[in-house]
Amino acid sequence: MAAASNVENQATGETFESESIGPLQSSVNALRESVEGFQSRLTATETLAGENFEKVSAAENAIKTLQTQNASLLDRIEDLENRSRRANLRIVNVPEGSEIGKDPVTSVAELLLEMTGTEVFDNPPTLERAHRSPGPKASGRP
């Protein structure tokens, strides 16, 4: 009888254990799944952060390169503008109508040849453009 009651107590104890541990085990399993989900999300987030860091670093390098090129181009533009201003000639007190029948470029080229003689130019100089600047109005008012 003692053996039968011992077996009965043992069976009851196992039943008690399975009844009390079962819900705990399912809770632990649920927590484990939750932690694994968070871990995979954290890994994905870390991967994205690493990729974004690389992209930001590449963008910063590109910005530095573009800033250097921009500064160089601005210097070049300023130099070219200054050179183009230095290559311009201003001729004043040329009477109106002196270029009748000729275009202004030909007229100015002939004028330069006439004024300097053949000492400076053997042929009329090659000019890109010539134009008159408006003078003050006859009434004296601008």
Image (tube, rainbow, N blue to C red):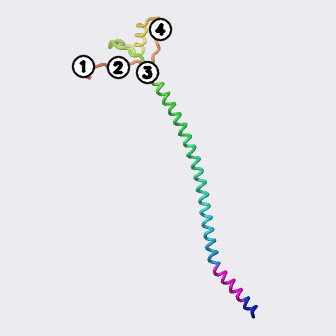
Circle 1: residue type: Gly
Circle 4: residue type: Phe
Compare residues 93 and 123 and report the one nearer the observer: 93
Position of 100 relative to 46 (above/below): above
Q: Which mark is residue 85?
A: 3
Labels 1, 3: front one = 3
* Of the image marks 4 and 1, the number of the one nearer the N terminus: 4
Element on which disc 1 rests:
loop
Q: How crowded is the residue under tag 3: few (<14 C-alpha within 10 Å), some, or many (20+)?
A: few
Q: Which mark is residue 140?
A: 1
Pointer 2 residue: 133
Q: CA distance from mark 4 to mark 3?
A: 22 Å
Pointer 4 residue: 121
Q: CA distance from mark 1 to mark 2?
A: 16 Å
Circle 3: residue type: Arg
- Residue at the front extreme, as displayed: 2
* Of the image marks 4 and 3, the number of the one nearer the N terminus: 3
Compare residues 99 and 132 and report the one nearer the observer: 132
Magenta span of residues: 8-20
